[in-house]
Amino acid sequence: MIKVLFICHGNICRSPAAEFVLQDLLSRAGLSEEYQIESAATSSEEIGNPVYPPMRRVLEQRNYDCTGKTARRVIRSDYDQFDLIIGMDDENIWDMRRLFHGDPDGKLHTLLEFDDRPYEEIPDPWYTRDFSGCLDEIELACSGLMEALTGVVFLDFSSCADISDLYTELRRKMNWAGWYGENLDALHDILTGLPHRGNRFIITPPGKDAPAEVRLYAEKISSVFLESGKGELE
């Protein structure tokens, strides 16, 4: 079992949100039993408190269940118990290095490293009050973490309004090189031999309100993934 611990200052906003997002991704991929996901604080200010109400409301709006979660403080033995320990900002990393006497096994990371932004931080919404924007950042970075851990990439076509939107999602999630064409033949070639991100793709189709041509073309895209043996419909 792979164990992941998310860390933020108080364990009432950012780190529990990351915990619930990654748990949800693993559940959707049928991999929950292979991972243990937790979160903790670097400070003692909020120990025992539930998820901060404004963050809880944003999480619930996106169907994440944070029932029963209360803040706990990270302890020195967590370093040996977890395989990855992921902070939200540089201060979190500094606090953990001090607690753990460094990082001898290379377990410490910032979350945005997994969105190819190793020198950026996720601002604390306790101060910014942008809880929705914070969750946007966490969802995006957790998708990258999910790929790093499992090779699973989620292709979400649910909000696509035209065919170009479908290819925007493909390019963003697959690291599709700019010189590849935007057509089904190019997709087939990529999946069967050209470089791309991910080795298993879980596809969310367009919504029922999407134009018929978008739904039809998304079905064709899904068929290419299914025929390659790398895709499945959610």
Image (cartoon, rainbow, N blue to C red):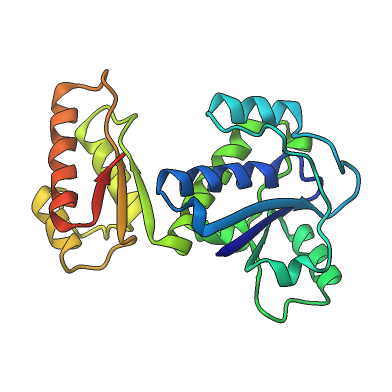
Q: Could you tell me residue 70's position as x and y percent?
A: 78, 39
On the rendered structure, is 220 left or right of 46? left
Q: In which quarter of the image is the C terminus?
A: top left
Q: Could you tell me residue 170's position as x and y percent?
A: 28, 48
On the rendered structure, is 60 left or right of 128? left
Question: Going by the picture, which residue comes out furthest to the left?
Answer: 185
Question: Going by the picture, which residue comes out furthest to the front?
Answer: 33
On the rendered structure, is 234 left or right of 49? left
Question: Going by the picture, which residue comes out furthest to the right?
Answer: 45
Q: Which residue is drawn at 28% across and 57% down?
A: 176
Q: Could you tell me residue 155's position as x and y percent?
A: 33, 44
Q: Which residue is drawn at 38% across and 61% down?
A: 151
Q: Residue at x 47, y 50 (%)?
A: 143
Q: Could you tell me residue 131's position as x and y percent?
A: 66, 32
Occupied quadrant, residue 130: top right
Question: Going by the picture, which residue comes out furthest to the bottom?
Answer: 104
Q: Residue at x 48, y 63 (%)?
A: 149
Total count of labels: 0
Q: Quadrant of the N terminus?
A: bottom right
On the rendered structure, is 24 left or right of 84? left
